[in-house]
Image (cartoon, rainbow, N blue to C red):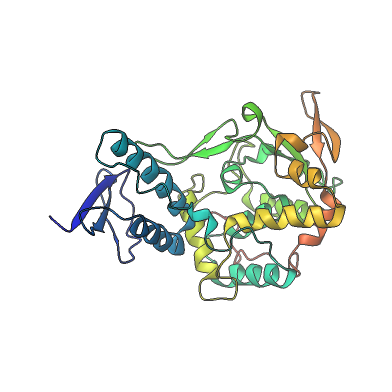
Amino acid sequence: PMGSLDLVLGRERPTLTRRHVNILPSGPLVLRIRCPLSGGSLRPVFLADYLDDIFDIVPGVASRHYVVLSGTFKMLTLAGLFDVSPMAPVPRPERCGGGQRALFPHERDQLYELICERVTRTRYFRLLFLTILGTGIRPGEAFPLWWSDVCGLDDITVEKAVLRVGATAVKPMSGGPVFRQNKRKHGKEGAAYYITLPRWLTAELREYKRLCAPESEDTPVFLSRLKRMVEPMGADQNLMRARVGSAVDWVTWGNLRDTVATHVVGRTGDRQRASAQLGHSEGASVAASHYIDQAGYVHVVVDNSEVLEELAPSKVGAKLEFGGSVNPSE
């Protein structure tokens, strides 16, 4: 009808509604955005407001919607429906929220305590948060981690485990559960890189593995309640549940990555060390030690572990918040 525009994009998901969004619950996943028109044209301000609304609810979904909308309006513009894409001036939603800002120690403590208090049924989430905070890896690189990627946990004499970061969580465009792609989306040709974990994170993962008792080393470290690899949307919703209405309501996964980079640069004065920690190829040759895997191959390992010891929330190690269950995926 005149005065509105329906866009049908992607797949449906459970309702995330704010004022502009109606997401249908079942069948082929469809996103329908009802857009008010002004003077017969779609205004960029509407799309920016729409993405801001979604970002407030689930930041990861807002990022994906930005990509889909940009591609869709580019196609419509090339087809002659628009002279200029209305998405052209719209900023990426990652620039909203916390922006590029590191967490102060008291904010890390507060967020950790909120997670322990509010996210009690999703047992993987506390360890997912600590893993990203203690390494700086991307969430999409954390979700598909297998136990075989964490080297040294079974040997109690190893104080600092080595983490192999070499996979990406991928959501099929046609639907279905997220799956592990055995290469990174970022970095040179998707190559894996290795990082040394701080002692506190090694201890947390070692105890978590003991409680999980995985049948195979190729079991995901972070399992959902359906015993599948964690879905990005589910992790985003849990982060929102932990932080909503608090002084750290602005925190996104990217802020944990910013925290690691800022801390490494601040303690070492070397930006390349932070770059190496985050998996950027330009920093891969610095802050390095070596690790020999079970096949006898030698790998360069980024080692900022002593610096990362200081990122542990103050209550880490006091107790594990598993509610007495030996199945952390429940």
The correct choice, above or below, for 298 with respect to 74 in the image is: above
* Nearer to us in this view, 38 or 304: 38
Using the rendered image of the protein, determine whether residue 290 is visible from the camera's viewpoint.
yes
Quarter of the figure with the N terminus: bottom left
Q: Position of residue 173 (x, y in %)?
A: 38, 37
| Residue under the image location 73 percent in, 54 percent down | 260
* Nearer to us in this view, 210 or 181: 181
| Residue under the image location 54 percent in, 49 percent down | 223
| Residue under the image location 59 percent in, 30 percent down | 183
Q: Position of residue 16 (x, y in %)?
A: 35, 61
Q: Position of residue 73 (x, y in %)?
A: 33, 42
Using the rendered image of the protein, determine whether residue 175 is visible from the camera's viewpoint.
no
* Nearer to us in this view, 215 or 47: 47
Residue most toward the left? 1
Q: Which quadrant would residue 258 be assigned to in this image?
A: bottom right
| Residue under the image location 64 percent in, 56 percent down | 127
The correct choice, above or below, for 83 with respect to 257 in the image is: above
**Is residue 189 left or right of 159 when viewed as pictured?**
left
Residue most toward the top? 296
Q: Please tell me how many numbered marks the rendered image carries.
A: 0
**Is residue 163 left or right of 224 when viewed as pictured?**
right
**Is residue 108 left or right of 41 when viewed as pictured?**
right
Q: Position of residue 203 (x, y in %)?
A: 77, 54
The correct choice, above or below, for 166 with respect to 157 in the image is: above
